[in-house]
Image (tube, rainbow, N blue to C red):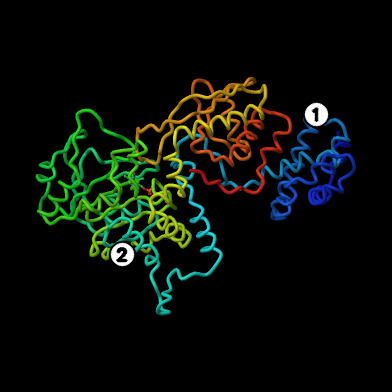
Amino acid sequence: MSNLFRSLPSMDALLTALAHPEQAGPGTPAASEQTARPYQADLAALPRPLLRDLVNAFLDQCRGAIRAGTITDAAALSTQALLPALAAHVLRAARPHFRRVLNATGVVIHTNLGRSLLAEEATAAVAEACANYSNLEFDLATGERGSRYSHVEELLCKVTGAEAGLVVNNNAAAVLLVLDTLCKGGEVVVSRGQLVEIGGSFRIPEVMEKSGAVLREVGATNRTHLRDYENAINERTVALLKVHTSNYRITGFHKEVGLAELVALGRARNLPVIEDLGSGSFLDFTPWGLHGEPTVREVVADGADVVSFSGDKVLGGPQAGLIVGRREIIARIKRNPLNRALRIDKMTLAALEATLRLYLDPELARRKVPTLRMMTAPADELARRARKLANRLRTALGDAATIGLAPGVSRVGGGSFPERDLPTTLVSVAPAGCSATALKERLLDTDPPLVGRLEDDTFRLDPRTLDDTEFPPAAAALAQALGLPGAQDAARPGKRAPRARRG
Ligand SMILES: *Cc1c(COP(=O)(O)O)cnc(C)c1O
Protein backbone atom coordinates (compact mmCIF):
# COMPACT_ATOMS: atom_id res chain seq x y z
CA MET A 1 0.00 0.00 0.00
CA SER A 2 2.81 2.44 0.85
CA ASN A 3 4.18 1.75 -2.65
CA LEU A 4 0.88 2.85 -4.07
CA PHE A 5 1.09 6.12 -2.14
CA ARG A 6 4.49 6.66 -3.71
CA SER A 7 3.03 6.03 -7.18
CA LEU A 8 0.79 9.06 -6.89
CA PRO A 9 1.91 11.81 -9.29
CA SER A 10 3.23 15.04 -7.84
CA MET A 11 1.23 18.23 -7.73
CA ASP A 12 3.43 19.74 -10.41
CA ALA A 13 3.06 16.74 -12.71
CA LEU A 14 -0.72 16.98 -12.43
CA LEU A 15 -0.78 20.75 -12.97
CA THR A 16 1.37 20.33 -16.08
CA ALA A 17 -0.85 17.55 -17.37
CA LEU A 18 -3.95 19.67 -16.85
CA ALA A 19 -2.36 22.51 -18.81
CA HIS A 20 -1.05 20.25 -21.59
CA PRO A 21 -3.18 17.09 -21.79
CA GLU A 22 -1.72 16.31 -25.21
CA GLN A 23 1.62 15.65 -23.51
CA ALA A 24 0.22 13.41 -20.81
CA GLY A 25 1.03 10.32 -22.78
CA PRO A 26 -0.12 8.36 -25.80
CA GLY A 27 -3.31 6.40 -25.86
CA THR A 28 -5.02 8.28 -23.08
CA PRO A 29 -8.36 9.91 -23.60
CA ALA A 30 -6.76 13.22 -22.70
CA ALA A 31 -4.29 12.85 -25.52
CA SER A 32 -6.82 11.94 -28.14
CA GLU A 33 -10.34 13.13 -28.73
CA GLN A 34 -10.55 15.04 -25.50
CA THR A 35 -7.80 17.49 -26.34
CA ALA A 36 -10.30 19.51 -28.29
CA ARG A 37 -12.63 19.82 -25.32
CA PRO A 38 -13.52 23.26 -24.09
CA TYR A 39 -12.29 22.43 -20.59
CA GLN A 40 -8.69 23.39 -21.26
CA ALA A 41 -9.63 27.01 -21.76
CA ASP A 42 -11.76 26.87 -18.60
CA LEU A 43 -8.85 25.42 -16.63
CA ALA A 44 -6.38 27.98 -17.92
CA ALA A 45 -8.67 30.73 -16.63
CA LEU A 46 -8.75 29.40 -13.06
CA PRO A 47 -6.72 31.24 -10.43
CA ARG A 48 -3.60 29.18 -9.68
CA PRO A 49 -4.14 28.96 -5.91
CA LEU A 50 -7.67 27.62 -6.49
CA LEU A 51 -6.36 25.09 -9.00
CA ARG A 52 -3.70 23.89 -6.50
CA ASP A 53 -6.32 23.51 -3.76
CA LEU A 54 -8.53 21.46 -6.07
CA VAL A 55 -5.66 19.23 -7.21
CA ASN A 56 -4.73 18.75 -3.54
CA ALA A 57 -8.28 17.73 -2.70
CA PHE A 58 -8.20 15.28 -5.61
CA LEU A 59 -4.92 13.77 -4.36
CA ASP A 60 -6.53 13.40 -0.94
CA GLN A 61 -9.40 11.51 -2.52
CA CYS A 62 -6.89 9.21 -4.25
CA ARG A 63 -5.11 8.55 -0.93
CA GLY A 64 -8.48 7.76 0.61
CA ALA A 65 -9.22 5.32 -2.20
CA ILE A 66 -5.84 3.60 -1.67
CA ARG A 67 -6.48 3.33 2.06
CA ALA A 68 -9.96 1.96 1.44
CA GLY A 69 -8.55 -0.58 -0.99
CA THR A 70 -10.53 0.63 -4.01
CA ILE A 71 -7.30 1.41 -5.85
CA THR A 72 -4.91 -1.54 -5.78
CA ASP A 73 -3.01 -1.10 -9.01
CA ALA A 74 -0.19 1.41 -9.57
CA ALA A 75 -1.15 1.72 -13.25
CA ALA A 76 -4.43 3.33 -12.18
CA LEU A 77 -2.37 6.05 -10.49
CA SER A 78 -0.38 7.25 -13.46
CA THR A 79 -0.83 10.83 -14.55
CA GLN A 80 -2.43 9.63 -17.79
CA ALA A 81 -4.88 7.39 -15.98
CA LEU A 82 -5.87 10.02 -13.45
CA LEU A 83 -6.19 12.94 -15.84
CA PRO A 84 -9.82 12.54 -17.00
CA ALA A 85 -11.12 12.14 -13.43
CA LEU A 86 -8.92 14.99 -12.24
CA ALA A 87 -10.14 17.32 -14.98
CA ALA A 88 -13.76 16.42 -14.20
CA HIS A 89 -13.18 16.96 -10.47
CA VAL A 90 -11.53 20.33 -10.99
CA LEU A 91 -14.14 21.62 -13.42
CA ARG A 92 -16.97 20.55 -11.16
CA ALA A 93 -15.48 22.00 -8.00
CA ALA A 94 -14.49 25.24 -9.73
CA ARG A 95 -17.97 26.00 -11.05
CA PRO A 96 -19.16 29.42 -9.94
CA HIS A 97 -21.58 29.26 -7.04
CA PHE A 98 -24.08 31.54 -8.76
CA ARG A 99 -24.83 30.09 -12.14
CA ARG A 100 -27.27 29.50 -14.91
CA VAL A 101 -30.11 26.96 -14.59
CA LEU A 102 -32.68 25.73 -17.08
CA ASN A 103 -36.19 26.67 -15.98
CA ALA A 104 -38.63 24.03 -17.20
CA THR A 105 -41.16 24.75 -14.43
CA GLY A 106 -43.44 26.89 -16.58
CA VAL A 107 -43.43 29.58 -13.89
CA VAL A 108 -42.45 32.62 -15.93
CA ILE A 109 -41.53 35.00 -13.11
CA HIS A 110 -39.87 32.50 -10.78
CA THR A 111 -38.42 34.52 -7.91
CA ASN A 112 -36.06 31.71 -6.85
CA LEU A 113 -34.73 31.38 -10.39
CA GLY A 114 -34.06 35.07 -10.90
CA ARG A 115 -37.47 36.45 -11.94
CA SER A 116 -37.41 38.19 -15.32
CA LEU A 117 -34.90 37.66 -18.11
CA LEU A 118 -33.85 40.86 -19.79
CA ALA A 119 -34.55 41.72 -23.41
CA GLU A 120 -31.49 41.67 -25.66
CA GLU A 121 -31.64 45.46 -25.86
CA ALA A 122 -31.37 45.60 -22.06
CA THR A 123 -28.48 43.13 -21.72
CA ALA A 124 -26.57 45.08 -24.38
CA ALA A 125 -27.17 48.31 -22.47
CA VAL A 126 -25.91 46.69 -19.25
CA ALA A 127 -22.73 45.48 -20.95
CA GLU A 128 -22.11 48.98 -22.35
CA ALA A 129 -22.81 50.68 -19.02
CA CYS A 130 -20.57 48.50 -16.92
CA ALA A 131 -17.57 48.33 -19.25
CA ASN A 132 -17.36 52.07 -19.93
CA TYR A 133 -17.58 55.43 -18.22
CA SER A 134 -20.96 57.03 -18.68
CA ASN A 135 -23.00 60.16 -18.02
CA LEU A 136 -24.54 58.48 -14.97
CA GLU A 137 -24.56 61.68 -12.93
CA PHE A 138 -23.18 64.08 -15.49
CA ASP A 139 -25.28 66.51 -17.49
CA LEU A 140 -23.95 66.55 -21.03
CA ALA A 141 -25.89 69.74 -21.83
CA THR A 142 -24.11 71.80 -19.16
CA GLY A 143 -21.02 69.79 -18.30
CA GLU A 144 -22.12 69.94 -14.69
CA ARG A 145 -23.25 67.34 -12.21
CA GLY A 146 -26.49 65.64 -13.28
CA SER A 147 -29.02 63.27 -11.75
CA ARG A 148 -29.04 59.54 -12.27
CA TYR A 149 -32.84 59.60 -12.27
CA SER A 150 -32.97 61.90 -15.29
CA HIS A 151 -32.28 58.96 -17.61
CA VAL A 152 -35.58 57.22 -17.02
CA GLU A 153 -38.00 59.73 -15.49
CA GLU A 154 -39.32 61.09 -18.77
CA LEU A 155 -39.81 57.61 -20.22
CA LEU A 156 -41.52 56.48 -17.05
CA CYS A 157 -43.92 59.43 -17.23
CA LYS A 158 -44.60 58.84 -20.91
CA VAL A 159 -45.43 55.18 -20.42
CA THR A 160 -47.54 55.62 -17.26
CA GLY A 161 -49.04 59.07 -17.77
CA ALA A 162 -47.71 60.17 -14.36
CA GLU A 163 -46.36 63.66 -13.61
CA ALA A 164 -43.10 62.44 -12.10
CA GLY A 165 -41.26 59.32 -11.07
CA LEU A 166 -38.15 57.84 -9.54
CA VAL A 167 -36.60 54.45 -9.21
CA VAL A 168 -35.06 52.63 -6.25
CA ASN A 169 -33.53 49.24 -5.54
CA ASN A 170 -36.74 47.18 -5.50
CA ASN A 171 -40.42 47.58 -4.73
CA ALA A 172 -39.90 46.70 -1.05
CA ALA A 173 -37.54 49.70 -0.89
CA ALA A 174 -40.06 51.79 -2.80
CA VAL A 175 -42.84 51.05 -0.30
CA LEU A 176 -40.53 51.76 2.63
CA LEU A 177 -39.37 55.05 1.09
CA VAL A 178 -42.90 56.22 0.26
CA LEU A 179 -44.18 55.43 3.77
CA ASP A 180 -41.10 56.95 5.41
CA THR A 181 -41.51 60.14 3.39
CA LEU A 182 -45.25 60.66 3.63
CA CYS A 183 -46.39 58.79 6.70
CA LYS A 184 -43.73 58.78 9.43
CA GLY A 185 -45.32 59.41 12.82
CA GLY A 186 -48.85 59.36 11.44
CA GLU A 187 -51.56 56.76 10.88
CA VAL A 188 -52.05 54.96 7.58
CA VAL A 189 -55.40 53.33 6.89
CA VAL A 190 -55.24 49.89 5.20
CA SER A 191 -57.83 47.18 4.63
CA ARG A 192 -57.38 43.99 6.70
CA GLY A 193 -57.76 42.04 3.47
CA GLN A 194 -54.59 43.63 2.09
CA LEU A 195 -52.02 43.07 4.86
CA VAL A 196 -49.94 40.88 2.61
CA GLU A 197 -46.82 38.92 3.21
CA ILE A 198 -44.87 38.17 0.08
CA GLY A 199 -41.91 35.80 -0.10
CA GLY A 200 -38.65 36.80 1.53
CA SER A 201 -40.32 38.24 4.64
CA PHE A 202 -41.78 41.41 3.17
CA ARG A 203 -44.88 42.08 5.25
CA ILE A 204 -46.88 45.26 5.02
CA PRO A 205 -47.34 45.64 8.81
CA GLU A 206 -43.60 45.22 9.39
CA VAL A 207 -42.52 47.58 6.63
CA MET A 208 -45.00 50.07 8.04
CA GLU A 209 -43.42 49.75 11.48
CA LYS A 210 -39.91 50.23 10.08
CA SER A 211 -41.03 53.41 8.33
CA GLY A 212 -42.29 54.84 11.60
CA ALA A 213 -45.89 54.95 10.40
CA VAL A 214 -48.74 53.49 12.43
CA LEU A 215 -50.90 50.89 10.75
CA ARG A 216 -54.62 51.51 11.13
CA GLU A 217 -56.26 48.33 9.86
CA VAL A 218 -59.90 48.48 8.91
CA GLY A 219 -62.62 46.11 7.77
CA ALA A 220 -62.63 42.34 8.03
CA THR A 221 -60.36 39.86 6.26
CA ASN A 222 -62.90 39.24 3.52
CA ARG A 223 -64.84 42.50 3.41
CA THR A 224 -63.91 46.14 3.73
CA HIS A 225 -66.35 48.98 3.02
CA LEU A 226 -65.78 52.64 2.26
CA ARG A 227 -67.35 53.54 5.63
CA ASP A 228 -64.61 51.50 7.36
CA TYR A 229 -62.00 53.86 5.90
CA GLU A 230 -64.18 56.92 6.67
CA ASN A 231 -64.65 55.93 10.30
CA ALA A 232 -60.93 55.32 10.80
CA ILE A 233 -59.82 58.76 9.63
CA ASN A 234 -58.85 61.09 12.48
CA GLU A 235 -56.48 64.00 13.06
CA ARG A 236 -53.45 61.66 13.10
CA THR A 237 -54.28 60.09 9.72
CA VAL A 238 -51.72 60.89 7.02
CA ALA A 239 -52.60 58.58 4.10
CA LEU A 240 -54.83 55.87 2.69
CA LEU A 241 -52.95 52.82 1.43
CA LYS A 242 -54.08 50.18 -1.04
CA VAL A 243 -51.95 47.06 -1.40
CA HIS A 244 -52.17 44.58 -4.24
CA THR A 245 -53.00 41.13 -2.88
CA SER A 246 -50.29 39.74 -5.10
CA ASN A 247 -49.94 36.11 -4.20
CA TYR A 248 -53.44 35.25 -3.00
CA ARG A 249 -57.04 35.89 -3.84
CA ILE A 250 -60.00 36.24 -1.58
CA THR A 251 -62.99 34.72 -3.30
CA GLY A 252 -66.56 34.12 -2.20
CA PHE A 253 -68.19 36.62 0.14
CA HIS A 254 -65.74 39.39 -0.55
CA LYS A 255 -65.65 43.16 -0.93
CA GLU A 256 -62.84 45.60 -1.52
CA VAL A 257 -63.06 49.34 -2.01
CA GLY A 258 -62.04 50.34 -5.54
CA LEU A 259 -59.28 52.83 -6.13
CA ALA A 260 -61.62 55.50 -7.58
CA GLU A 261 -63.75 55.49 -4.42
CA LEU A 262 -60.68 55.63 -2.21
CA VAL A 263 -59.32 58.54 -4.24
CA ALA A 264 -62.61 60.43 -3.86
CA LEU A 265 -62.42 59.92 -0.10
CA GLY A 266 -58.75 60.97 -0.03
CA ARG A 267 -59.54 64.15 -1.96
CA ALA A 268 -62.47 65.00 0.34
CA ARG A 269 -60.31 64.57 3.46
CA ASN A 270 -57.11 65.97 1.93
CA LEU A 271 -55.20 62.68 2.31
CA PRO A 272 -52.87 61.17 -0.28
CA VAL A 273 -53.80 57.76 -1.64
CA ILE A 274 -50.82 55.39 -2.00
CA GLU A 275 -51.01 52.19 -4.01
CA ASP A 276 -48.49 49.36 -3.75
CA LEU A 277 -49.27 47.66 -7.04
CA GLY A 278 -46.80 44.81 -6.52
CA SER A 279 -46.24 43.64 -10.05
CA GLY A 280 -47.51 46.55 -12.07
CA SER A 281 -47.93 46.06 -15.79
CA PHE A 282 -47.88 48.43 -18.73
CA LEU A 283 -49.84 46.12 -21.03
CA ASP A 284 -53.43 44.97 -20.89
CA PHE A 285 -53.23 41.17 -20.99
CA THR A 286 -56.96 40.60 -21.49
CA PRO A 287 -56.45 39.34 -25.08
CA TRP A 288 -54.24 36.58 -23.63
CA GLY A 289 -56.78 35.47 -21.07
CA LEU A 290 -55.19 37.34 -18.19
CA HIS A 291 -57.78 39.83 -17.04
CA GLY A 292 -58.63 41.77 -13.92
CA GLU A 293 -55.34 43.64 -13.50
CA PRO A 294 -55.33 47.38 -14.17
CA THR A 295 -52.29 48.79 -15.96
CA VAL A 296 -50.13 51.34 -14.15
CA ARG A 297 -51.50 53.98 -16.55
CA GLU A 298 -55.06 53.16 -15.44
CA VAL A 299 -54.11 53.34 -11.76
CA VAL A 300 -52.47 56.72 -12.33
CA ALA A 301 -55.51 57.91 -14.32
CA ASP A 302 -57.81 56.78 -11.50
CA GLY A 303 -56.06 59.37 -9.36
CA ALA A 304 -53.68 57.46 -7.09
CA ASP A 305 -51.23 60.04 -5.73
CA VAL A 306 -48.26 57.65 -5.54
CA VAL A 307 -47.95 54.20 -7.08
CA SER A 308 -45.07 51.77 -6.63
CA PHE A 309 -44.29 48.51 -8.43
CA SER A 310 -41.46 46.10 -9.27
CA GLY A 311 -39.14 46.32 -12.25
CA ASP A 312 -38.59 42.58 -12.57
CA LYS A 313 -42.08 41.14 -12.27
CA VAL A 314 -44.53 41.54 -15.19
CA LEU A 315 -42.58 44.55 -16.45
CA GLY A 316 -39.82 42.13 -17.44
CA GLY A 317 -36.95 44.47 -16.59
CA PRO A 318 -34.19 44.48 -13.99
CA GLN A 319 -34.75 44.32 -10.23
CA ALA A 320 -35.99 47.80 -9.31
CA GLY A 321 -38.74 49.61 -7.48
CA LEU A 322 -40.54 52.15 -9.63
CA ILE A 323 -42.40 55.01 -8.01
CA VAL A 324 -44.65 57.32 -10.03
CA GLY A 325 -47.13 59.96 -9.00
CA ARG A 326 -47.83 63.61 -8.33
CA ARG A 327 -44.90 65.95 -8.90
CA GLU A 328 -44.73 67.50 -5.41
CA ILE A 329 -44.94 64.11 -3.71
CA ILE A 330 -42.21 62.60 -5.90
CA ALA A 331 -40.06 65.67 -5.20
CA ARG A 332 -40.39 65.08 -1.45
CA ILE A 333 -39.50 61.39 -1.90
CA LYS A 334 -36.42 62.33 -3.93
CA ARG A 335 -35.23 64.60 -1.12
CA ASN A 336 -35.55 61.89 1.56
CA PRO A 337 -32.00 60.94 2.70
CA LEU A 338 -33.15 57.29 2.81
CA ASN A 339 -33.38 57.51 -0.99
CA ARG A 340 -29.58 57.62 -1.17
CA ALA A 341 -29.34 54.32 0.69
CA LEU A 342 -31.86 52.66 -1.60
CA ARG A 343 -30.59 53.97 -4.91
CA ILE A 344 -30.17 51.84 -7.99
CA ASP A 345 -26.87 51.18 -9.71
CA LYS A 346 -25.86 52.06 -13.26
CA MET A 347 -26.38 48.55 -14.64
CA THR A 348 -29.97 48.54 -13.44
CA LEU A 349 -30.53 52.00 -14.89
CA ALA A 350 -29.16 50.91 -18.25
CA ALA A 351 -31.37 47.83 -18.32
CA LEU A 352 -34.40 49.78 -17.17
CA GLU A 353 -34.05 52.54 -19.75
CA ALA A 354 -33.68 49.98 -22.55
CA THR A 355 -36.73 48.05 -21.29
CA LEU A 356 -38.91 51.14 -20.85
CA ARG A 357 -37.99 52.29 -24.35
CA LEU A 358 -39.44 49.08 -25.79
CA TYR A 359 -42.74 49.89 -24.09
CA LEU A 360 -43.11 53.02 -26.23
CA ASP A 361 -44.49 50.49 -28.72
CA PRO A 362 -46.49 47.92 -26.70
CA GLU A 363 -46.44 45.30 -29.46
CA LEU A 364 -42.65 45.67 -29.76
CA ALA A 365 -42.38 45.17 -25.99
CA ARG A 366 -44.59 42.09 -26.18
CA ARG A 367 -42.34 40.52 -28.76
CA LYS A 368 -39.00 41.54 -27.28
CA VAL A 369 -39.38 41.37 -23.51
CA PRO A 370 -38.90 37.68 -22.63
CA THR A 371 -41.37 37.78 -19.71
CA LEU A 372 -44.11 39.17 -21.96
CA ARG A 373 -43.25 36.79 -24.79
CA MET A 374 -43.50 33.79 -22.48
CA MET A 375 -46.71 35.04 -20.84
CA THR A 376 -48.40 35.53 -24.19
CA ALA A 377 -47.06 32.47 -26.04
CA PRO A 378 -49.96 30.96 -28.01
CA ALA A 379 -51.13 27.45 -27.03
CA ASP A 380 -50.59 26.03 -30.53
CA GLU A 381 -47.01 27.28 -30.62
CA LEU A 382 -46.38 25.72 -27.19
CA ALA A 383 -47.83 22.42 -28.42
CA ARG A 384 -45.58 22.49 -31.48
CA ARG A 385 -42.52 23.28 -29.36
CA ALA A 386 -43.45 20.54 -26.87
CA ARG A 387 -43.48 18.02 -29.74
CA LYS A 388 -40.09 19.26 -30.89
CA LEU A 389 -38.67 18.92 -27.36
CA ALA A 390 -40.23 15.45 -26.96
CA ASN A 391 -38.64 14.27 -30.21
CA ARG A 392 -35.27 15.53 -29.11
CA LEU A 393 -35.60 13.79 -25.75
CA ARG A 394 -36.63 10.50 -27.40
CA THR A 395 -33.50 10.64 -29.55
CA ALA A 396 -31.24 11.59 -26.66
CA LEU A 397 -32.61 9.18 -24.06
CA GLY A 398 -33.61 6.10 -26.07
CA ASP A 399 -34.80 3.30 -23.79
CA ALA A 400 -33.73 5.12 -20.64
CA ALA A 401 -37.06 6.93 -20.38
CA THR A 402 -40.55 7.02 -21.82
CA ILE A 403 -41.39 10.43 -23.26
CA GLY A 404 -44.96 11.68 -23.55
CA LEU A 405 -47.02 14.83 -23.98
CA ALA A 406 -49.67 16.03 -21.56
CA PRO A 407 -51.91 19.08 -21.40
CA GLY A 408 -51.06 21.25 -18.43
CA VAL A 409 -50.91 24.76 -17.05
CA SER A 410 -48.16 27.32 -16.63
CA ARG A 411 -48.16 30.19 -14.15
CA VAL A 412 -47.14 33.82 -14.46
CA GLY A 413 -45.55 33.74 -10.98
CA GLY A 414 -44.04 36.64 -9.05
CA GLY A 415 -47.34 37.26 -7.33
CA SER A 416 -48.79 38.37 -10.65
CA PHE A 417 -52.14 37.06 -11.81
CA PRO A 418 -52.29 34.53 -8.95
CA GLU A 419 -54.38 31.44 -9.60
CA ARG A 420 -54.65 32.23 -13.30
CA ASP A 421 -53.85 29.18 -15.40
CA LEU A 422 -52.03 29.56 -18.70
CA PRO A 423 -52.75 26.50 -20.86
CA THR A 424 -49.65 24.72 -22.11
CA THR A 425 -48.39 21.34 -23.32
CA LEU A 426 -45.97 19.55 -21.00
CA VAL A 427 -43.35 17.00 -21.97
CA SER A 428 -43.33 14.13 -19.48
CA VAL A 429 -40.31 11.95 -18.76
CA ALA A 430 -40.84 8.59 -17.05
CA PRO A 431 -37.37 7.19 -16.32
CA ALA A 432 -36.88 3.43 -16.73
CA GLY A 433 -34.21 2.92 -14.09
CA CYS A 434 -35.20 5.22 -11.24
CA SER A 435 -38.14 7.11 -9.80
CA ALA A 436 -39.18 10.48 -11.19
CA THR A 437 -38.37 11.95 -7.77
CA ALA A 438 -34.80 10.61 -7.96
CA LEU A 439 -34.48 12.02 -11.48
CA LYS A 440 -35.66 15.43 -10.33
CA GLU A 441 -33.02 15.42 -7.59
CA ARG A 442 -30.21 14.33 -9.91
CA LEU A 443 -31.13 17.08 -12.36
CA LEU A 444 -30.14 19.64 -9.73
CA ASP A 445 -26.58 18.42 -10.10
CA THR A 446 -26.26 18.44 -13.87
CA ASP A 447 -24.41 21.09 -15.78
CA PRO A 448 -26.45 23.23 -16.14
CA PRO A 449 -29.03 22.11 -13.57
CA LEU A 450 -32.53 21.51 -14.96
CA VAL A 451 -35.48 22.49 -12.77
CA GLY A 452 -38.86 21.02 -13.65
CA ARG A 453 -41.92 19.63 -11.94
CA LEU A 454 -43.21 16.30 -10.72
CA GLU A 455 -46.71 15.41 -11.83
CA ASP A 456 -48.36 11.99 -11.97
CA ASP A 457 -45.10 10.27 -11.09
CA THR A 458 -43.31 11.74 -14.09
CA PHE A 459 -40.82 14.54 -14.44
CA ARG A 460 -42.35 17.31 -16.54
CA LEU A 461 -40.92 20.09 -18.66
CA ASP A 462 -42.91 23.11 -19.75
CA PRO A 463 -41.64 24.57 -23.04
CA ARG A 464 -43.10 27.98 -22.08
CA THR A 465 -40.08 28.88 -19.95
CA LEU A 466 -37.53 26.90 -21.91
CA ASP A 467 -36.09 28.56 -24.99
CA ASP A 468 -35.56 26.53 -28.18
CA THR A 469 -31.81 27.03 -27.73
CA GLU A 470 -32.15 25.34 -24.34
CA PHE A 471 -33.63 22.10 -25.71
CA PRO A 472 -30.19 20.54 -26.47
CA PRO A 473 -28.72 21.28 -23.02
CA ALA A 474 -31.98 20.10 -21.40
CA ALA A 475 -31.75 16.80 -23.30
CA ALA A 476 -28.08 16.50 -22.35
CA ALA A 477 -28.85 17.19 -18.68
CA LEU A 478 -31.49 14.44 -18.68
CA ALA A 479 -29.06 12.05 -20.38
CA GLN A 480 -26.44 12.90 -17.79
CA ALA A 481 -28.88 12.42 -14.89
CA LEU A 482 -29.95 9.06 -16.33
CA GLY A 483 -26.30 7.98 -16.50
CA LEU A 484 -26.16 7.56 -20.27
CA PRO A 485 -22.60 7.10 -21.58
CA GLY A 486 -20.94 10.22 -22.96
CA ALA A 487 -23.64 12.35 -21.42
CA GLN A 488 -21.24 14.04 -19.01
CA ASP A 489 -19.51 15.81 -21.86
CA ALA A 490 -22.57 16.54 -23.92
CA ALA A 491 -24.20 18.39 -21.06
CA ARG A 492 -21.33 20.77 -20.70
CA PRO A 493 -22.61 23.89 -22.38
CA GLY A 494 -20.34 25.70 -24.78
CA LYS A 495 -20.50 29.44 -24.85
CA ARG A 496 -23.98 30.49 -23.96
CA ALA A 497 -26.12 30.90 -27.03
CA PRO A 498 -28.27 34.01 -27.06
CA ARG A 499 -31.90 33.21 -26.47
CA ALA A 500 -33.52 32.98 -29.85
CA ARG A 501 -36.30 35.38 -30.60
CA ARG A 502 -39.72 33.92 -30.80
CA GLY A 503 -43.18 35.29 -31.23
C1 LIG B 1 -43.55 41.76 -5.01
C2 LIG B 1 -44.22 42.76 -4.13
C3 LIG B 1 -43.48 43.65 -3.33
C4 LIG B 1 -41.98 43.60 -3.29
O1 LIG B 1 -41.42 43.89 -4.50
P1 LIG B 1 -39.86 43.55 -4.75
O2 LIG B 1 -39.58 44.18 -6.07
O3 LIG B 1 -39.73 42.08 -4.73
O4 LIG B 1 -39.10 44.18 -3.65
C5 LIG B 1 -44.15 44.54 -2.55
N1 LIG B 1 -45.50 44.57 -2.52
C6 LIG B 1 -46.25 43.73 -3.27
C7 LIG B 1 -47.74 43.83 -3.18
C8 LIG B 1 -45.64 42.80 -4.09
O5 LIG B 1 -46.36 41.96 -4.83
Please report the residue visible at 45 percent of the width from the left and 40 percent of the height from the top: 108
x and y, in percent, of residue 110 in the image: 45, 40
Element marked by disc 2: helix
Q: Residues within 10 Å of mark 2 (few under 14, many from 20)?
A: some
Where does label 2 land, which residue?
334
Element marked by disc 1: loop
- Residue 91 against residue 400 in the figure, above or below: below
Comparing 158 with 323, the one in front is 158
Total residue callouts: 2
Comparing 184 with 307, the one in front is 307
Q: Which amino acid, mark 2? A: Lys
Is the N terminus in the top left, top right, bottom left or bottom right quadrant?
Answer: top right
x and y, in percent, of residue 256 in the image: 19, 38
The Cα atoms of the two marked residues, 2 and 1, are separated by 69 Å
x and y, in percent, of residue 141 in the image: 40, 77
Task: Give residue 69's mark.
Answer: 1
Q: State yes or no: discs 2 and 1 in contact (Cβ < 8 Å).
A: no
Task: Pick whichever of labels 2 and 1 is earlier in the sequence.
Answer: 1
Comparing 289 with 475, the one in front is 289
Left or right position of 442 against 306: right
Please report the residue visible at 62 percent of the width from the left and 31 percent of the height from the top: 392
Please report the residue visible at 19 percent of the width from the left and 29 percent of the height from the top: 253
Left or right position of 147 against 186: right
